[in-house]
Amino acid sequence: MRTANLCLALSLMLSLLQGCAAEGDPFERQAGLSNEVGVIYVYRPLTSVIGRGEDPYVSIAGRNMGRLRAGGYVKLVVSIGEHKVTAHQSLFLLPSWPRSVEVAVASGGSAYVKVDQRITDVDFSGGASATQQIFIEEVSSTTGQSEIATLRENT
């Protein structure tokens, strides 16, 4: 019976996560930036469904950008200077603990932030439960441009 419950729980988790990849337009760099602004790109790599957590919520410079799907990105044109990028878990009716990074945006420049939410522990001792964790980091332009190139705009 325990094996059947385990299979059922895993099947349910996988079915909830399938089809959760971004489906928007392919990545395009922001064109036509003036000297007074830059752009922040926040992206989530398309990883295996196994171990992938729910879609985290993202905000850039205090503006809510919504849920960030796997294989997707969001962008925001911002004034030059320091800006906070925040990601927090999507948990049903429970408080979440946001994770943030501060990024510097130069005149006409770009900053890249990589975000992911992964399942870090699964427990079947009292039913089925999973622990998820947010990972967020600013990456170099070279890394960001390389990793975001195949992603799709979050819609």
Image (tube, helix red, strand yellow):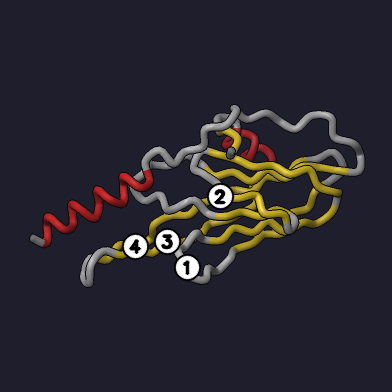
In the rendered structure, the answer to whether residue 97 lies left or right of residue 20 reads right
Distance of label 3 from label 1 (alpha carbons): 15 Å
**Which dot, 2 or 1, sits closer to the camera?**
1
- Residue located at (37% from left, 41% from top): 18
The residue beneath circle 3 is 132
Q: Nearer the viewer, residue 102 or 79?
A: 79
Task: Give SS at disc 1.
Answer: loop
The residue beneath circle 2 is 67
> Quick one: label 3 or label 1, which is nearer the N terminus?
1
Q: Amino acid at mark 4?
A: Ala
The residue beneath circle 4 is 130
Distance of label 2 from label 1 (alpha carbons): 16 Å
Disc 2 crowd rating (10 Å Cα; few below 14, some 14-19, many 20+) is many
> Quick one: label 4 or label 1, which is nearer the N terminus?
1
Q: Are marks 3 and 4 in contact (CB under 8 Å)?
A: yes
Distance of label 3 from label 4 (alpha carbons): 6 Å
Specify the quadrant of the image occupied by residue 153.
Answer: top right
Q: Is residue 99 above or below residue 56?
A: below
Q: Are marks 2 and 4 in contact (CB under 8 Å)?
A: no
- Residue located at (57% from left, 32% from top): 24
The residue beneath circle 1 is 93
Q: Amino acid at mark 2?
A: Arg
